[in-house]
Amino acid sequence: MANVILDHVDGISYDPDVFPMRNMHAIDFMPVGLFRLASMIKAEEARKLAANPNVVFEAFCAMDPLIPCSFGWFAVSLVNHIRLIGFVDVMNKNGWGISDISLNRKTISSHCASYVSRVVPDIYTWRNKVAAHFAATDPFPMDNMGTLEQSLMNNVGFINGRICVNAGSWVIGGQQANLPCWSLTRIYEDLIPRFWPESILDFSPDKCVPPNSAR
């Protein structure tokens, strides 16, 4: 079987016939799940624009809970998927087999974390402080009061045609939250050339193309 290219920018690929992990089904199903979330939010953005084409900024006082949940699910799944690509990379570079994993735990973990933080730094921060667990429930010494408060808010806004989280930065006691503002659809679209060059995200569901459609 031909090599499967996982990262077209860094040139990371693997041969399913010889890679030590024989059943990496997540490599195929996780991108499709990410695409489903992105296409759902893209359709919601289309509805918002159709209702008010001139809107520049709108804070969501009331919203479908599925919207903020989707950002959390997307962040956790995207980080998991990118960590898996980092895993393939470090295993290939070192010629390791499955028996080498437990012997090289720190190297593997460090390589995967470094790769994620380089490719999607904002999403990695959001995943660590909001999506995987709220900062307030797992506080670190560097988490200021603004970050602890805003980690529970998931405040959503509509900015220049995109639904974003952390549309504003919360300040409490003079301490400003250290959480990024990001758009799920923009992140997905920015990653298309790197991970899923065959994929298309469009306002029209009929024009959307999922990842791995060529395989």
Image (cartoon, rainbow, N blue to C red):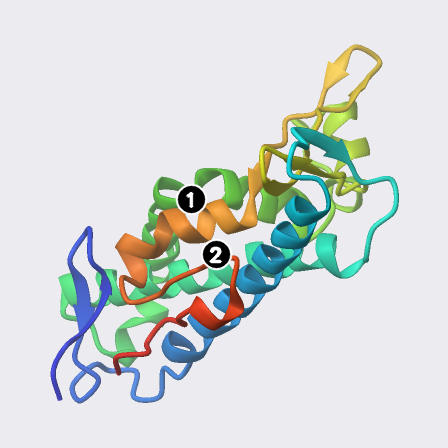
Determine whether, in the image, residue 89 is placed left or right of residue 34.
left
Residue 86 in the image: above or below residue 153: below
Disc 1 and disc 2 in contact, CB within 8 angstroms = yes
Question: What percent of the width, then of the height, locates residue 32?
Answer: 46, 73
Residue 50 in the image: above or below residue 207: above
Q: Judging from the image, what secondary structure is the residue with disc 2 in?
A: helix
Q: Judging from the image, what secondary structure is the residue with disc 1 in?
A: loop
Q: CA distance from mark 1 to mark 2?
A: 8 Å
Say few, some or many: other residues with alpha carbon within 10 Å of mark 1 (under 14 / 14 to 19 / 20 or more): some
Determine whether, in the image, residue 59 is placed left or right of residue 35.
right
Question: What percent of the width, then of the height, locates residue 74?
Answer: 57, 59
Residue matched to label 1: 120
| Residue 107 in sight | no
Residue 202 in the image: above or below residue 176: below
Looking at the image, is mark 1 or mark 2 earlier in the sequence? 2
Question: What percent of the width, then of the height, locates residue 5?
Answer: 20, 68
Q: Residue at x 21, y 84 (%)?
A: 16
Residue extending furthest top?
174
Q: Residue at x 52, y 57 (%)?
A: 203
Residue matched to label 2: 79
Residue 91 in the image: above or below residue 15: above
Question: What percent of the width, then of the height, locates residue 119?
Answer: 36, 45
Which amino acid type corresponds to the residue marked 1 in the rendered image?
Answer: Val
Determine whether, in the image, residue 100 is placed left or right of residue 47.
left
Determine whether, in the image, residue 13 is placed left or right of residue 114.
left
